Image (cartoon, rainbow, N blue to C red):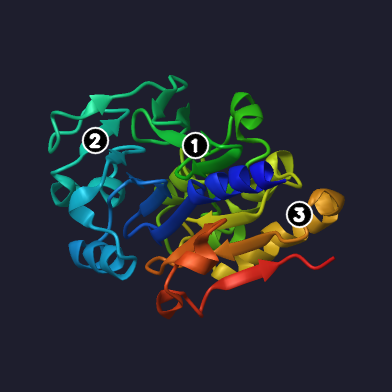
Amino acid sequence: MEKGETLARVIYLVSMKFHLIASGSKGNCFILQNDKRVIVIDCGGTRRHLISSFNKLGIDINKIDLLLITHSHSDHISQLPVFKNCLVYSPVYLEKREDAKILRPRQTFKIDKMVVTPIPLSHDSGITVGYIFECNNEKLVYVTDTGYVHSSNIELMKDADYIVIESNHDLTMLMNSSRPQYLKSRIKSDTGHLCNEDCAVVLEKIVSKKTKKIILAHISEETNTYELALKTNVDYLLENKRCDLNNDLKIVAARQFEIVSGGIDYEESFNSDYSISSCVEWVFNV
């Protein structure tokens, strides 16, 4: 018994902890902590917001182990100079970081015991990837900026403990908006962004009893609402997946600039003064 308890304690200490600190057309940035490692996905938004958020979380922005880039749009790489002291991995060449290591979709690599798998996405920015992180029986999926999710990725994304996925727009709101037709066509195309309904369909295929938290990300402030994104996804999952949902499942619709955190040891180790009370969220009830 003592041996089992010791093992459980070790796994607890190295469990994942994560923070989505910016998500949307004005900037994107995600932080993953595992043991002593700090990994950042994308670095868009304002310099002030990123630095302020890192400070609130008690993370030294100058001591990041690795910055992973998803693609080259400015809302994902605008603050590259802020991360000048860390290694950068990217699926594409970056003018501001010529030393960035080029990674290939589906070519896994390891960070200590963590296995990282870049997965190919469909977006109008050359090569675009999402990331899957696996360590100590925990799995986190990060997928934004894609017009659709290819069936070959579904198997890789299944049974994750944590899922960050875009629910970018409501199709009716998009088509009724004042945006020019070419932009509407781009957004709803296979190289654009996932709408609420398409996001829900993907979630229905990959969510399992193991899934503890879903963060709906990259939500449009003009052609969607946080409440609508949440309702569309929750209603679809309840209708099609109710019996396969974790009793503690939480789904959060992330605002553009607020901190949404999670992970097994998050509640006990994170300073509650910085938790976000305005989150649009849903918690499963048996």
Residue at which label 3 appears: 246
Residue 86, disc:
none
* In-front residue for pair 218/249: 249
Decide if residue 266 is on the left or right side of residue 234: left
Secondary structure under tag 3 reads loop
Residue at which label 2 appears: 88
Is residue 65 shown above or below 169?
A: above
* In-front residue for pair 182/141: 141
Query: Which quadrant of the rendered structure holds the C terminus?
Result: bottom right
Residue 133, disc:
1
Q: Residue 86, image x and y in percent?
A: 19, 41
Looking at numbered disc 3 in the image, what kind of residue is underneath it? Asn
The residue depicted at 68 percent of the width and 57 percent of the height is 233
| Number of other residues with Cα within 10 Å of mark 3, as a class: few under 14, some 14 to 19, many 20 or more | some
Looking at numbered disc 2 in the image, what kind of residue is underneath it? Val
The residue depicted at 51 percent of the width and 62 percent of the height is 266
| Number of other residues with Cα within 10 Å of mark 1, as a class: few under 14, some 14 to 19, many 20 or more | many
* In-front residue for pair 242/271: 271
Residue 28 visible to the viewer: yes
Looking at numbered disc 1 in the image, what kind of residue is underneath it? Phe
**CA–CA distance between discs 1 and 3?**
20 Å
* In-front residue for pair 191/134: 134
**CA–CA distance between discs 2 and 1?**
17 Å
Is residue 117 shown above or below 83?
A: above
Is residue 271 shown above or below 247?
A: below
Q: Which of marks 2 and 3 is nearer the N terminus?
A: 2
